[in-house]
Amino acid sequence: MLGLLIGPFRAKLVIVGTAFLLGAALSHAGQPLYRYTGADGTVHFTNVPNDRKFHRVFLTERGLVRDGAERRARNKIPEYAGFDRLIERAATAYALDPALVKAVIAAESNFDPRATSHKGAQGLMQLMPKTARGLGVSNPYSPQDNVLGGARYLREMLDRYGDMSRAIAAYNAGPTAVDRYRGVPPYRETQKYVTRVLHYYRGYHRDFAQR
């Protein structure tokens, strides 16, 4: 079930399936359509947005898509070279492609060595304290220690699964989940994470091509 709020009348509806038919009705009526998803999962639609949290959406044969600016922002690859030499050393130590290590760092911490997640993951490659200890990382906020530890763990996942997508999924969701589902788990967060890392990975090849 999908909860919807339609503006400007703000009449609440609950429908089964997708918002495609609603979008079609408004679109074919010649009205622009704006949307945002509330914290409780309710999807809000309006043709007269009065808040910046609303984003323009468009109707395609596959349904509603976000506006071009938002799609470009989502697909943009973070640009930062400050850790490239460290990434190369760690990648060499564990026989990894440096572009993959950099892609994981970008997805995990956006190159912030002091990053700490709400679950307690720490540093550039967002190592959980227990994982860090198992990898011999005494200071997860040290870029060198963190990247070497994260690269070692990534190597272990690649050796375990022999497949990049599953290894990346295991880095995010843990190997237990990958084993349970015999592949990338059906978790939306993990599936988006794998897609993002692979996207970054392709883009970061150029950063190391001339080295």
Image: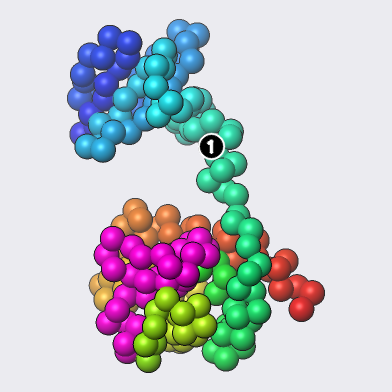
In the displayed structure, does residue 6 sit left or right of residue 96? left
- Residue 191 in the image, given as x and y percentages of width and height: 40, 58
SS state under label 1: helix
Residue at point 26% right, 25% down? 4
Quarter of the image that includes the N terminus? top left
Q: What is the quadrant of residue 96 in the picture? A: bottom right
In the displayed structure, does residue 44 sit left or right of residue 197? left
- Residue 90 in the image, given as x and y percentages of width and height: 56, 85
Q: Measured along the vertical axis of the image, is residue 179 above or below residue 6? A: below
Q: Amino acid at mark 1?
A: Glu
Magenta region, residue range: 106-134
In the displayed structure, does residue 120 sit left or right of residue 54? left
Q: What is the quadrant of residue 189 in the picture? A: bottom left
Magenta span main SS: loop
Q: What is the quadrant of residue 177 in the picture? A: bottom left
Residue at point 60% right, 55% down? 77
Q: Measured along the vertical axis of the image, is residue 163 above or below residue 52? A: below
Is 111 one of the magenta-colored residues? yes
Quarter of the image that includes the C terminus? bottom right
Which sits in the foreground, 191 or 61? 191
Which sits in the foreground, 209 or 120? 120
Which sits in the foreground, 58 or 146? 146
Residue at point 35% right, 83% down? 132
- Residue 145 in the image, given as x and y percentages of width and height: 47, 84
Residue 54 visible? The answer is yes
Colour convention of the picture = rainbow
| Residue holding disc 1 | 70
Q: Callout 1: 10 Å neighbours few (<14), some, many (20+)?
A: some
Residue 186 visible? The answer is no
- Residue 151 in the image, given as x and y percentages of width and height: 49, 82
In the displayed structure, does residue 133 sit left or right of residue 206? left
Is 209 one of the magenta-colored residues? no
